[in-house]
Image: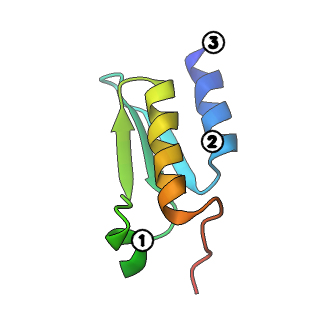
Amino acid sequence: MTFDRHLAEIAREFPHWTIWRSDAGRWWATRHHPLNAEQRDAGCAMTIDADDPEGLRDQLRDQQRRTGPVEPEPP
């Protein structure tokens, strides 16, 4: 699968995150909205990274488990 296709699929799967790949080849995701205190206490991160697309998906799923399947919209 191509790099662009991986990016597009992950972005569709996790719409509350911006997904990109660095020039060094690491895969990154950052949230669109700031974390609240409850999310920080649950171990949520604003930005995560991984060696490959599947590693990033694993981390995104972990973040989802910490916040629930749907991210709240900011007030």
Q: Residues within 10 Å of mark 3 (few under 14, many from 20)?
A: few
Residue designated by label 1 = 39
Going from N to C along the chain, the mark reached first, 3 or 1, is: 3
Q: Position of residue 52 (x, y in %)?
A: 43, 23
Residue designated by label 2 = 11
Q: Position of residue 42 (x, y in %)?
A: 38, 67
Where 65 falls versus 48 (above or below)?
A: below
> Which amino acid does the dot numbered 1 rest on?
Gln
Q: Residue at x 58, y 87 (%)?
A: 75
Q: Residue at x 42, y 71 (%)?
A: 39
Is residue 60 or residue 18 the one in the foreground? Answer: 60
Where 45 falls versus 29 (above or below)?
A: below
**Disc 3 and disc 1: Cα gap in Å?**
33 Å
Is residue 21 or residue 58 the one in the foreground? Answer: 58
Going from N to C along the chain, the mark reached first, 3 or 2, is: 3
Quadrant containing the N terminus is top right
Going from N to C along the chain, the mark reached first, 1 or 2, is: 2
Residue 36 shows in the view: no
Residue 6 shows in the view: yes
> Which amino acid does the dot numbered 2 rest on?
Ala
